[in-house]
Image (cartoon, helix red, strand yellow):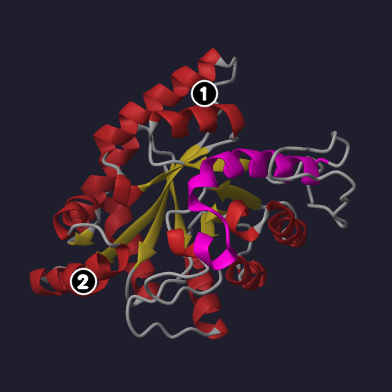
Amino acid sequence: MDFGAHLPLLDFGGQPYSLGHLTEYVDAARRLGFAAVSANDHLVFAAPWLDGPTALAAALGHAGQMTLATTVSLPVVRGPIALAKTLGAIDRLSGGRLVVAVGPGSSERDYAAVGIDYAERWQRLDEAIQALRALWRRSDEPFVGRFYSTEGIDLQPGPARPAGPPIWIGSWGSRAGLRRTAWLGDGWLASAYNTTPDLFAEAWSQLRGFLAEGGRDTEAFPNALATMWCYITESRSEADAIFRTRLAPTIHRPEEVLRERLPVGPADAFAEKLSAFRDAGVQRVFIWPVRDERRQLELFAEEVLPAVTT
């Protein structure tokens, strides 16, 4: 298992949005040995949310050799052609270090903002993934579907890699989502606040069964766990305040569920949770500090990693 860091895009209260804040965070992640940095995507949300692709592009000059990832991006909301252009440029400028995880998104407000029926999101997502691939693999036949067509569209310059960035599928672990991942994906991205080690292990086993049915290599297929909001503290009252005033109002999940699933509290409890996910088959975890982001990355490296079971 290795670790990535979500860029601090979501305002949990008093977020100092600035280029300096973003790049200092990326510098810290690189210095501390994180394998990747990632950006999530919303247009409108319950709290302010800095634009994901823009932030990821801003991190390019500070990321070193870290992987750049979207966790996830929204090809239906943004449109597959516009997203292919943006992410293709990031892949080219990074020298081919981008991993593109996509999903339909969980916010009806994003769909209302762009005038797309939320009920169509899954059918549109299936087509959008195929459209992205056709746009990036210029030697392929164009994709023509019910919602999208790439016929006659040549996005130049293309990504750094001839086949384009790998496309992972974001899924919380439903049977339909796992089948979609086995059919269309180059990897699986799960969600930390929507799973547990036991649930992940069950879904991972099911996904590998679907991959085998399709004749795909189950051993080489990658996975990761995103949106692991976290805060390391030995103070019970501080942890309680994080859950009550920052996480529960912003994420809109019951507080008791978030307390079970998110590592807010002592470092040893965080390490125990990570070890359980590692034993369940998780290969990479993207952590997301909810406050004092850079210092939390340092605490993670100093106090959590050495305690993770090897």
Instruction: Please give the label number shown on residue 242.
Output: 2
Name the residue rendered at 68%, 57% in the picture. 83
Tell me if residue 40 can be seen. no
Query: Tag 1: Cα neighbours inside 10 Å, few (<14), some, or many (≥20)?
Result: few
Sequence-wise, the earlier of marks 1 and 2 is 1
- Report the quarter where the N terminus lies: top left
Image position of 273 with respect to 14: above or below: above
Name the residue rendered at 27%, 37% in the picture. 197
Q: Position of residue 9 (x, y in %)?
A: 47, 71
Name the residue rendered at 57%, 56% in the picture. 116
For label 1, the SS is loop
Tell which of 36 and 71 is nearer to you.
71
Tell which of 305 and 100 is nearer to you.
100
* Quadrant in which residue 291 is drawn: bottom left
Apparent side of residue 58 relative to residue 260 in the rendered image (left or right) = right
* Quadrant in which residue 198 is drawn: top left
Name the residue rendered at 49%, 52% in the picture. 118
Query: Tag 2: Cα neighbours inside 10 Å, few (<14), some, or many (≥20)?
Result: some
Q: Main secondary structure of the magenta part?
A: helix
Tell which of 203 and 79 is nearer to you.
79
Instruction: Give yes or no for residue 32 being in the magenta stretch.
Output: no
Q: Position of residue 39 (x, y in %)?
A: 53, 62
Q: Position of residue 232 (x, y in %)?
A: 24, 66
Pointer 1: what residue? 219
The residue segment tinted magenta is 111-137
